[in-house]
Amino acid sequence: MKWQRLLYNNMSPRILLRTFQRISGFRFSSTKPAFTSDRYNVKRGAYASISNDHVAFFNELLGRNRVIVDAEECEGYNIDYAKIVRGKSTLVLKPRTTDEVSTILKFCNENRLAVCPQSGNTGLVGGSVPVFDEIVISMKFMNKIIETNELAGVLTCEAGCVLEDLDNHLGTVGLMMPIDLGAKGSCLIGGCVSTNAGGLRLLRYGNLHGNVLGLEAVKANGEVIDCLNTLKKNNTGYHLKHLFIGSEGTLGIVTKVAIQCPPLPKAVNVALLGLNSFEKVLKAFRLAKAELAEILSSFEMMDKRSIDISFTTFGMKSPLTSKTDGHDFYVLLETSGSNVNHDEEKLGSFVEKALADDIIEDGTLTSDPTKVKHIWALRERISEGVLKEGYVFKYDISIPLSSYYKVIEVIQERLRDPRVIRISGYGHLGDGNIHVQVSIPSYEPDIASQLEPFIFEYVSELRGSVSAEHGIGFVKTKYLHKSRTSSEIKLMHQLKKLMDPNGILNPYKVLHPLEFPA
Amino acid sequence: MEDYKFLFKVVLVGNAGVGKTCLVRRFTQGLFPPGQGATIGVDFMIKTVEVENEKVKLQIWDTAGQERFRSITQSYYRSAHALILVYDISCQPTFDCLPDWLREIEEYASNKVLRILVGNKIDREDREIPTHVGEDFAQRHGMYFLETSAKEAENVERLFMEIAAELMEQARSKELPRYETNTTSINGKTTSIGDTSNCGCSRLS
Ligand SMILES: Cc1cc2nc3c(=O)[nH]c(=O)nc-3n(C[C@H](O)[C@H](O)[C@H](O)COP(=O)(O)OP(=O)(O)OC[C@H]3O[C@@H](n4cnc5c(N)ncnc54)[C@H](O)[C@@H]3O)c2cc1C
Ligand SMILES: Nc1nc2c(ncn2[C@@H]2O[C@H](COP(=O)(O)OP(=O)(O)OP(=O)(O)O)[C@@H](O)[C@H]2O)c(=O)[nH]1
Ligand SMILES: [Mg+2]
């Protein structure tokens, strides 16, 4: 038994988990979404249109292989993962170096050509695809690892590396990425940084404002800003990296990233728990914090209607069997630590107390990589599976834990419409962040208007955030003011003006000067 | 947790495939699951039963028999009130492994834990371990003994009910503090429950 366990540890559980399948290629067989510009009635900014001369310049710079003009091929860059937006770009560029990005931006800035930076295109707020004919700058080819400092635990790489690839690489030297999310097989580190993505282990490792030590970015005019610091501490002057973390490609294009990486845990355990009320989910969280303290690395909750997507759409089996029709709520809990026995001791006592205090109905606990992967997949495939139902209104909100699940009940109450397939909630409970999803066969403006602005106002009243981790992108620009004060928004506009005076970087996103129809 | 007086932790161990999960599912859900897969890690659940008009909660831990699937081994023995050690009456190797299981129990469990030896699958025609052999083994090691069939629902209910009754009796007679205090000092020397003479369940401790 000892031998088995040691072997497993050496193979690093996390590497084994990472075999989780990459998001399968986009399927455009079903109906394409309406053009964003039509659905939202957007007015095109005063930008130049792409001419043959422009294309010739890019062909000269990158070679024809990295300049995509084929309409069919461009379509994949015009539609987002969740198929809620669709742009009309006719030109995609694929730079390989910072110099190339710099030359592209300098040229675009001088010629008033708008651009849309794109990484894995998994963003969920319509920020990663153009609205009109903005030139897509795809970062996929900037995927070199520059340096891995094992001792300091610092990775320096280009912005286009796939998150999962980085994690697999780090696993070989006993380190891991401080960020993990369901889109890890497709999203790129630069995309994560640009959205300040949170993910499944933020609870433990914190957000990217802390974990990104430095970065390199290119401003709209082509100027390269080198703040590729790799020190853990460097309080000198302004911390400019933060301008590029979470600004969704509106202030510059991130080209390189230095990120701090925690050691790969020796022991990883995952539990799936079945509970019969949200109140008990909160109790379980409290107990987990008390009993598991520093080894707790994830605490995710799913309601029945959310996890049902994984059961029915993908035919995945529930590992919990004591109740034939399932539980009202589920908790996925992960611990990561450095000492197997120590962690097991804590988990054993957590489970015992949770059972004794009637908090959980049943549960399963394992460190077996295959089962761990299966349990994680039940959680991670929800957002992929719900898309198969049609159009999905998705809200990613932060609200105080006391009202965390109430928002779902409120929407269920408000939206009694036979067209609605599912209203469900799941998310990073440990971070006070819930994902609300409402699915219907296809987009309906009147359903949209029943949901918005209602939900944002509701969140705002609770002093929550209208976008906890997905960002503002295109679809939430109207509601930025619900979570930011006017003084903040004013400074944002000033910064934008300073860094991108011609407004060529990802226009119509985050800050929106144009009016939307109600 | 207000509406019950007793809470006991019952842990099932034994070789892979002897029917631990089927016994639990028969007891908790009243069914015999077709194609039950191997347990990976440990599954736990609550089942409330009534003994002499008292509500007793059983916290059941169903562990993996396969070595490579076992986890938190030490913790699940710790503070267990009863251990059900299961073998398959139609499979000699599962019986031969019992001493190994006992060694593990000695190592991790409280020495006062209630221990029950269960020979499962008595519905099978190809029996390899005669009842008296199982009984002898149990007697020698101070364990209760019972033969069951998860498939035919034979003695399954009874297995858990007797455990509940016995633990309740012990707790009462020793005026044991309740579960919350985390004590595991269950004393085996109490009076017998029910009539055990003609049902294959003998008190042996
Ligand atoms: C299944 C699934 C699960 C998800 N889970 C989570 C989650 O748990 N937590 C979370 O926070 N998000 C989650 N997301 C949302 C999304 O995956 C993340 O925001 C991710 O970080 C986006 O990365 P990307 O490479 O796909 O970027 P993209 O979608 O391509 O781009 C995102 C935004 O950043 C800009 N951008 C991209 N690259 C650059 C660059 N190099 N420089 C400047 N700007 C750039 C784009 O213009 C766009 O505005 C999930 C998405 C899916 C599909
Ligand atoms: N005939 C018969 N078969 C049984 C009985 N109980 C279990 N089985 C069968 O034995 C096999 C194993 O049963 P499980 O309950 O999964 O065994 P287990 O002890 O939980 O196995 P692990 O989880 O691997 O430790 C299954 O194919 C069951 O159908 C029984 O009472 N009679
Ligand atoms: Mg089993």
Image: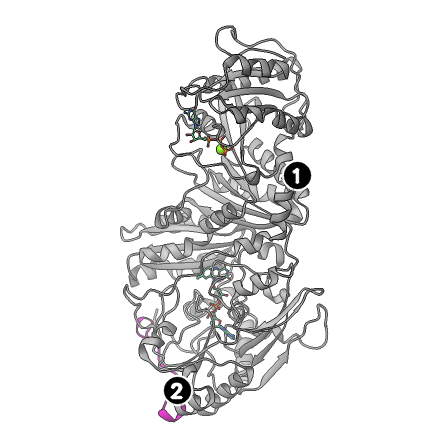
Q: Is residue A39 magenta?
A: yes
The quarter of the displayed image where residue B14 is located:
top right
Instruction: Select label 1 or label 2 by which is in front.
Output: 1
Ligand 1 within 8 Å, label 2 CB: no
Provide residue A103's location: percent of width, then percent of height.
51, 88
Q: Residue furthest bottom?
A: A53
Q: Is A335 above or below relative to B150?
A: below
**B88, above or below A90, in the image:** above
Identify the secondary structure beneath mark 2.
Answer: loop
Give the magenta range.
Answer: A37-54
Chain letter of the residue carrying label 2 = A
* Mark 1: amino acid: Glu
Q: Which residue is located at x 61 percent, y 20 percent?
A: B114
Task: Report which residue position mark 1 lands on.
Answer: A345
Q: Position of residue A304 (x, y in %)?
A: 41, 44
- The correct choice, above or below, for A145 with respect to A309 in the image is below
Q: Main secondary structure of the magenta part?
A: loop
**According to the image, label 2 marks what residue?**
A46
Figure quadrant of the C terminus of chain A: bottom left
CB within 8 Å, label 1 to label 2: no
Q: Position of residue B135 (x, y in %)?
A: 55, 13
Which picture quadrant has residue B191? Answer: top right
**Amino acid under disc 2:** Ala
- Distance, label 1 to label 2, CA atoms, is 64 Å
Identify which residue, A499 or B50, lies in the foreground: B50
User: As rendered, which of A396 and B58 lies closer to the eye?
Assistant: B58
The residue depicted at 43 percent of the width and 83 percent of the height is A114
Instruction: Answer above or below: position of B5 versus A185.
Output: above
Give the letter of the chain under mark 1.
A
